[in-house]
Image (tube, coloured by chain):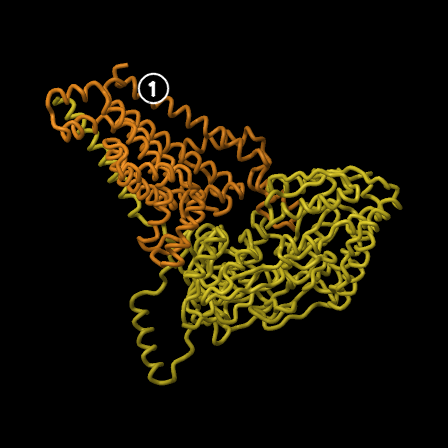
């Protein structure tokens, strides 16, 4: 009996010890990265004294007020703009930085950290004249050295968005507040790339902190300053009191919460735990209609979905080489029906690779759904009985893409293009797309962060590009022409020529531009997401 | 006893090595993360340059050797996405997962065991009905669905708890409950059937024939023996919970290991996936070994075999 009792005691003690150990563990909170404390106690006191003086002497200066909470759809992996791997991380990061120029909503560029800029006669060199009154969050002055240093740091191959920076061949300091940025050839994309990607960082602080530490608590000139980043949970930024845009930002603090599930975002915006719930489906949006204190906003997204053809590898010497066949496939698909049935009508038909918000969009009529015409075109091309061909899609790679692909596959079968749909794991699918191993028919989409379609035209159709599966000599030269035409009106003209050509010799069947749904609490003012699902929060305010 | 422990531990180490090899090659089966990590507009040369820089263009076996060598020194490499040591990231997420697992385990044990004991001692009683209902619901209701229902009812409508996140103590209640339910169901059924079985055993009849009271028989004889299978189940379940739960952590936006591993797989963040797989397997194996040892301590028959 005694032995058994002893044993029992040991067991109980072990269980208790395990529970105590386990229970102790959660007491340690996740490692929280806090902003570097640079202010000494003495200086703080001085600041307090001056504050007292200001309040008594003048009316109270403008002060940012309230807290804005944004639900992001993913746990962000980086908060430095050039490393931000996707849109959500990019949006959150951009609150802390500025670039030389700022992209306006209508596709133009206005001065930001650069007051003005000139372009050299040969179109290869941009001279930026910098603002003289800007300091970084740590007090370091912003000047030409910061521009040169930022470019040197972020044009390295290991940087995720190095391609935004390597567009410049040289970045040279002319004097303290003037820099020359040169491209190898005249390049119309320089300004857009600088605007979206060139986040300016302080050379001294970056060098002292090192790459890794800087990535955890970055410093910029932006409207908000880094406060806290608990990975997998939230990012907090606070208003920059010395922001160069007078009277901004309007909110004192922004918290980005990472809410992967759409259902969670829907719930959280109803309780007011978050103010902005992005990337909802039209179904989610429906359930929120009429919820008190919540408004639903909807806007077109600059992302074109397309059925691609291949004439480089798998589709070589197939019926696809004939333009009539490709035109036939466009006539065979009832896009309006797909949009109505699958997206409840909330999508815009694509008429080309140039989007409605892009430069040079010609607003052509969409291709008419006409089975007879499709069959006729196939017969004209020499395929009266159709043909067999494989088709692939990225399984759940995009919202409702499987449904769309099944519908397309069915429509193609109807006109005699016998196909079986192969839904492939999305990441493996894109890998095969890059290796040009996908079947001759495949569905994909391409977004644009700037209101200009050059990036996706070049990416999907340029010679030797990673994701290009189609080669058309005429198109390649037209797209090259876009790149070197710096004058906006002339570029728009080339874009119109491209659109016409791409309807006669379609390298894709253009499907649709999706629409984005977001739920926003009614206390939020002036939140204006753009077609790239991006937004700037410095002019957003909240009322309580 | 010593031999028993040594063989358990040896097995554990072998399993762990196997897991590492499997994970290493499995995460690389669909290609490397170079294209995923760079912009879609990046040129093939830029992709190649990136591969070169990150070492992805070396033969797999060389990469594996490098990985094993470093793993021995406790270095799992840097996460490709966070650009921080994988192990630090795991430790950062661990408290959230441990908290959730402990809360869930306590909920499961505190609710399931009394229900199972009473149910087993008096089958057919109202308490037994409740216990059996929990057993059924716990093992059949999908956690994802239950989580959403709880959020709608208790967070959106009643506002008793926050919908998601890990802020105040109330935020752990709903995810903890959802996570506990499966284990709770299993424990109720197991406890109940153990008690039922034991109550019919010879030694209980002997105890009765000695004239011992029902409560003495129940608490001193039946209970102790019923505990033996429970230890195994609790140990193993706790191990799984500590590995993180993808669905529950995603729905409740709980910053734990489950979400980290799900996202890392999607991003082909090899070092991080390897680190988490290693860690989670190590925890499960460790708890299994501990359970084995506990089991042997409680039940002498195992030691002597």
Q: Position of residue B15 (x, y in %)?
A: 42, 25
Question: Residue shown at 33%/84% (left/top)?
Answer: A56
Q: Position of residue A172 (x, y in %)?
A: 61, 62
Residue B70 placement, left or right of B176: right
Local packing at callout 1 (Cα closer than 10 Å; few below 14, some 14-19, many 20+) is few
Specify the quadrant that holds the C terminus of chain A.
bottom left
Residue at far top of view:
B305
Mark 1 belongs to chain: B
Question: Is residue B298 among what the camera can see?
Answer: no
Q: Nearer the viewer, residue A450 or B34?
A: A450
Q: Position of residue A218 (x, y in %)?
A: 46, 57
Residue A68 higher or lower than B247, as above or below: below
Colour seen for chain B: orange
Query: Label 1 belongs to which residue?
Result: B7
- The chain shown in yellow is which? A
Q: Quadrant of residue A394?
A: top right
Q: Position of residue B282 (x, y in %)?
A: 38, 32
Q: Nearer the viewer, residue A460 or A331?
A: A331
Question: Residue shown at 31%/74% (left/top)?
Answer: A48
Question: Is residue A12 among what the camera can see?
Answer: yes
Q: Quadrant of residue A450?
A: bottom right
Question: Residue shown at 34%/22% (left/top)?
Answer: B8
Say which element carries label 1: helix
Q: Nearer the viewer, residue A143 or A339?
A: A339
Specify the quadrant that holds the N terminus of chain A.
top left
Q: Quadrant of residue A434?
A: top right
Q: How many marks?
A: 1
Residue at far left of view:
B211
């Amino acid at each position: 009996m005694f032995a058994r009792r002893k044993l029992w005691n040991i067991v109980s003690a072990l269980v208790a010890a395990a529970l105590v150990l386990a229970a102790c563990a959660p007491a340690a909170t996740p490692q929280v990265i806090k902003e570097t404390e640079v202010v000494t106690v003495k200086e703080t006191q001085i600041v307090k004294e001056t504050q007292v003086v200001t309040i008594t002497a003048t009316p109270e200066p403008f002060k940012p007020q309230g807290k804005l909470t944004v639900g992001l759809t993913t746990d962000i992996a980086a908060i430095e703009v050039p490393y931000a791997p996707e849109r959500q991380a990019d949006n959150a990061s951009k609150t802390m930085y500025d670039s030389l120029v700022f992209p306006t909503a209508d596709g133009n560029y206005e001065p930001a950290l650069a007051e003005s800029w000139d372009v050299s006669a040969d179109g290869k060199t941009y001279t930026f004249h910098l603002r003289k009154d800007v300091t970084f969050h740590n007090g370091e002055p912003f000047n030409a050295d910061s521009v040169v240093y930022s470019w040197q740091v972020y044009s390295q191959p290991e940087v995720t968005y190095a391609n935004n920076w390597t567009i410049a061949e040289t970045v040279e300091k002319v004097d303290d507040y003037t820099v020359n940025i040169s491209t190898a050839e005249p390049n119309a994309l320089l300004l857009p790339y600088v605007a979206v990607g060139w986040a300016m960082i302080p050379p001294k602080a970056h060098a002292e902190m090192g790459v890794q530490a800087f990535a955890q608590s970055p410093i910029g000139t932006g409207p908000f300053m880094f406060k806290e980043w608990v990975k997998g949970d939230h990012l907090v930024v606070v208003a920059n009191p010395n922001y160069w845009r007078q009277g901004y930002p309007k909110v004192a603090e922004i918290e980005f919460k990472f809410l992967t599930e759409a259902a969670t975002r829907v719930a959280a915006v109803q309780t007011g735990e978050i103010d902005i719930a992005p990337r909802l489906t039209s179904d989610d949006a429906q359930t929120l209609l009429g919820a008190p204190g919540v408004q639903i906003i909807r806007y077109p997204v600059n992302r074109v979905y397309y059925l691609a053809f291949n004439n480089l590898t798998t589709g070589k010497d197939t019926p696809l080489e004939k333009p009539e066949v490709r035109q036939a496939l466009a006539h065979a698909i009832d896009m309006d029906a797909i949009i109505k049935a699958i997206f409840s009508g909330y999508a815009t038909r694509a008429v080309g690779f140039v989007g409605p918000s892009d430069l040079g969009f010609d607003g052509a009529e969409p291709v008419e759904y006409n089975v007879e015409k499709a069959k006729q075109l196939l017969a004209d091309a020499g395929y009266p009985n159709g043909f067999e061909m494989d088709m692939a899609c990225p399984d759940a790679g995009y919202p409702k893409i499987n449904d769309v692909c099944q519908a397309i596959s069915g429509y193609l079968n109807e006109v005699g293009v016998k196909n079986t749909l192969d839904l492939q794991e999305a990441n493996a699918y894109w890998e095969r797309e890059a290796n040009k191993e996908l079947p001759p028919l495949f569905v994909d989409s391409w977004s644009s962060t700037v209101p200009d379609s050059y990036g996706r035209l070049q990416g999907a159709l340029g010679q030797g590009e990673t994701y290009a599966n189609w080669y058309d000599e005429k198109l390649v030269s037209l797209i090259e022409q876009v790149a070197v035409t710096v004058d906006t009106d002339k570029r728009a003209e080339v874009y119109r020529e491209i659109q016409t050509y791409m309807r006669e010799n379609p390298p894709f069947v253009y499907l649709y531009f999706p629409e984005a749904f977001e739920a926003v609490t009614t206390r939020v003012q002036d939140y204006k997401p753009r077609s790239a699902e991006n937004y700037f929060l410095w002019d957003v305010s909240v009322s309580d | 006893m010593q031999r028993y422990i040594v063989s358990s531990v040896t097995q554990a180490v072998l399993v762990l090595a196997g897991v590492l090899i499997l994970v290493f090659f499995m995460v690389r089966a669909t290609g490397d993360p170079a294209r995923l990590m760079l912009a879609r507009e990046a040129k093939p040369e830029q992709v190649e340059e990136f591969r070169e820089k990150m070492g992805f263009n070396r033969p797999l076996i060389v990469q594996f050797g490098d990985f094993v060598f470093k793993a021995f020194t406790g270095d799992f490499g840097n996460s490709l996405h966070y650009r921080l040591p994988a192990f630090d990231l795991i430790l950062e997420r661990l408290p959230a997962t441990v908290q959730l697992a402990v809360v869930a385990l306590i909920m499961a044990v505190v609710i399931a065991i009394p229900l199972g004991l009473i149910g087993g001692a008096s089958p057919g009683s109202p308490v037994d009905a409740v216990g059996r209902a929990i057993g059924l619901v716990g093992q059949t209701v999908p956690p994802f669905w239950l989580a959403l229902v709880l959020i709608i009812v208790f967070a959106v409508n009643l506002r008793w708890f926050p919908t998601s996140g890990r802020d105040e103590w109330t935020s752990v209640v709903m995810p903890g409950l959802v996570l506990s339910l499966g284990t709770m169901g299993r424990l109720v059924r197991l406890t109940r059937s153990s008690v039922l079985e034991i109550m019919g055993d010879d030694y209980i009849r002997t105890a009765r024939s000695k004239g011992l009271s029902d409560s003495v028989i129940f608490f001193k004889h039946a209970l102790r023996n019923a505990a033996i299978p429970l230890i195994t189940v609790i140990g193993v379940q706790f191990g799984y919970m500590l590995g993180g739960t993808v669905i529950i952590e995603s729905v409740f936006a709980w910053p734990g290991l489950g979400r980290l591993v799900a996202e890392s797989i999607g991003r082909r963040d090899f070092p991080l996936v390897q680190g988490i797989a290693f860690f989670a397997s190590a925890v499960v194996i460790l708890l299994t070994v501990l359970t084995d040892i506990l089991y042997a301590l409680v039940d002498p028959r195992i030691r002597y075999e």
